[in-house]
Image: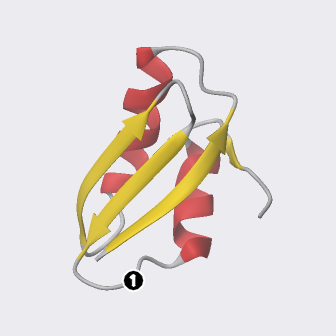
Amino acid sequence: MESTFTVTGMTCSHCASSVTEEISKIAGVTGVDVDLASGLVTVTSDTDPDPQAVASAVDEAGYSLASA
C-alpha cells in the first residue's frame, strides 16, 4: 500500500535522508520515496501506515507534516 504525506521544512538531501531513515523504522514500512522539491513523501508498507506514527517519525527527524 502507498500513502503520500507532505513534509514541510526539507531543503536538502540530508533532510530527505533523515526523514527517510526515521519513517523506515516504522513497523511494516517497506519503502520511502522523498520528492525534495515538492515535499511529498510516499510511504510504501504492508498495511496502511499509521499517520500518527509517520508524524512522530517526521518530527523525530526535525520536520513536520503539513496540515491537510
Pick whichever, 59 or 33, lies toward us. 33
Which residue appears farthest toward the front when viewing the image? 38
Please state which amino acid type lies under the numbered disc 1. Asp
Neighbours of disc 1 within 10 Å: few (<14), some (14-19), many (20+): few
Pick whichever, 68 or 62, lies toward us. 68
Query: Going 32% across and 44% down the picture, which residue do you hit?
Result: 33
Locate residue 34, reporting x and y percent: 40, 38
Above or below for 45 versus 34? below
Which residue appears farthest toward the right when viewing the image? 67
Query: Going 44% across and 29% down the picture, which residue do you hit?
Result: 16
Quarter containing the N terminus: bottom left
Judge from the rendering whether residue 22 lies leftward or rightward of residue 61; answer left or right: left
Above or below for 42 versus 17? below
Query: Going 61% across and 73% down the picture, which residue do you hit?
Result: 52
Quarter containing the C terminus: bottom right
Judge from the rendering whether residue 63 lies leftward or rightward of residue 14; answer left or right: right
On the image, numbered disc 1 is attached to which residue? 48
Above or below for 25 versus 49? above
Locate residue 9, reporting x and y percent: 69, 28
Locate residue 36, reporting x and y percent: 48, 27
Judge from the rendering whether residue 9 lies leftward or rightward of residue 42; answer left or right: right
